[in-house]
Image (cartoon, helix red, strand yellow):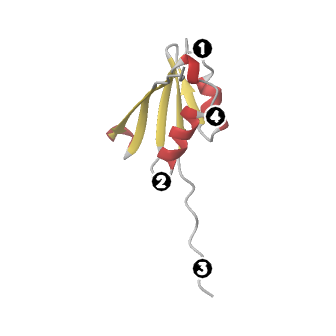
Amino acid sequence: MRAKSLVLCSQKKDIHEGQAISLRYIGVSKNSRGRGISSALVEKLKTNGVPLTASVLNGNQSGMVDRLVKIGFTKMGSDDKEAKLRWAPVIEASKSAD
């Protein structure tokens, strides 16, 4: 019997963040967790070179905040409802001409 997996990912350009992609929801079916699927999806989005934002509900039991921090997101703050995180691409400084 083949294992079935379901991956859900929702993204939206967030005009309040100036061209950032806002990750609204990432979910992986229970039998497919632990395989790095959500991390791979986020890493693919990073290749666009556009900042990413995410909000994680405080009741989240999957450790999503810690996982996002592990792959380069910075925790920007939190309130009684959620934690807000952001990843921005590293912009290399132009080499000065001699």
Residue 94 falls in which quadrant of the image?
bottom right
Q: Secondary structure at mark 2?
A: loop
Residue underneath mark 4: 69
Give left or right: position of 21 versus 42: left
Q: Residue at x 60, y 26 (%)?
A: 65
Task: Name the N-terminal-most of marks 2 and 4.
Answer: 2
Give left or right: position of 12 versus 66: left
Residue underneath mark 2: 49
Disc 3 to disc 1, how far (Cα)?
48 Å
Disc 2 to disc 4, how far (Cα)?
18 Å
Disc 4 to disc 1, how far (Cα)?
15 Å
Q: Residue at x 55, y 11 (%)?
A: 59
Residue underneath mark 3: 96
Q: Secondary structure at mark 4?
A: helix
Q: Residue at x 52, y 13 (%)?
A: 80
Q: Secondary structure at mark 3?
A: loop
